[in-house]
Image (cartoon, rainbow, N blue to C red):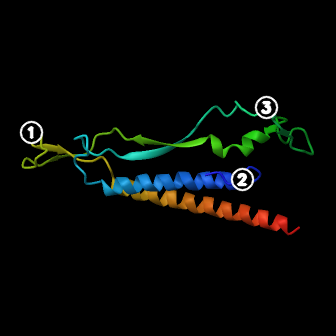
């Protein structure tokens, strides 16, 4: 979701909200399938998780004009003299991508000789989803979502106040 080119705070917060929403959806799917012994492929359900990756290298920019912002300092040794690339700040949210992964670890093996999916020794491999881990992940994603929402509201208030000047 892109809100506006001139307001990077909105875009960064909106991207954060989008990523946290995707994490919450995956966590909900994991919790719903925590007792699923076999999925559509005939294998035990594998826990899914979301990682955030860059779409491309941050040092490569496609824009033909790149602006730099130099930080003013009172002493040269306070902050390094490297310049901050303005395009990197403006397009930082566009370079992030949420990637869905699958946890390949084995689930718990339970002895149930009468179960239809039991192997020749009577053991059934269960899903590798741990409800406690998923609940902790859900709390963290909820807190991150709230933090991004607070940042978005702060950016909105700054934009509103700047129009009143």
Q: In the displayed structure, would residue 120 be above or below residue 22?
A: above
Q: Mark 1 points at which residue?
A: 121
Secondary structure type for disc 3: loop
Mark 3 or mark 1: whose residue is earlier in sequence? 3
Residue 4 - label: 2
Tell me where residue 127 appears, x and y as whole percent.
Answer: 27, 47
| Residue lying farthest to the bottom in this orientation | 164
Q: Which of marks 2 and 1 is in front?
A: 2
Q: Quick one: 27 or 10, which is closer to the camera?
A: 10
Residue 64 - label: 3
Asked whether residue 137 is in view, the answer is: no
Tell me where residue 78 appears, x and y as whole percent.
Answer: 85, 42
Residue 95 located left or right of residue 162: left
Residue 5 located left or right of residue 145: right
Mark 2 or mark 1: whose residue is earlier in sequence? 2
Q: How far apart are marks 3 and 1 (CA)?
A: 66 Å
Query: Quarter-wise, where is residue 52 in the image?
Result: top right
């Amino acid at each position: 979701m892109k809100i506006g080119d001139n307001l990077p705070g909105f875009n960064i917060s909106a991207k954060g909200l989008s990523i946290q929403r995707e994490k919450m959806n995956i966590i909900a799917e994991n919790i719903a399938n925590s007792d699923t012994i076999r999925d559509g492929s005939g294998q035990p359900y594998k826990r899914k998780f979301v990682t955030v990756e860059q779409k491309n290298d941050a040092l490569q920019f496609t824009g033909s004009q790149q602006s730099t912002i130099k930080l003013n300092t009172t002493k040269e040794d306070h902050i390094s003299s490297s310049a901050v690339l303005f395009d990197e700040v403006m397009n930082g949210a566009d370079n992030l991508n949420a990637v869905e992964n699958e946890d390949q670890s084995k689930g718990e093996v339970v002895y149930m000789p009468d179960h239809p999916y039991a192997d020749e020794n009577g053991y059934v491999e269960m899903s590798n989803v741990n409800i406690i881990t998923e609940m902790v992940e859900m709390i963290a994603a909820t807190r991150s979502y709230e933090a991004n929402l607070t940042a978005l509201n702060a950016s909105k208030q700054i934009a509103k106040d700047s129009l009143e000047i």
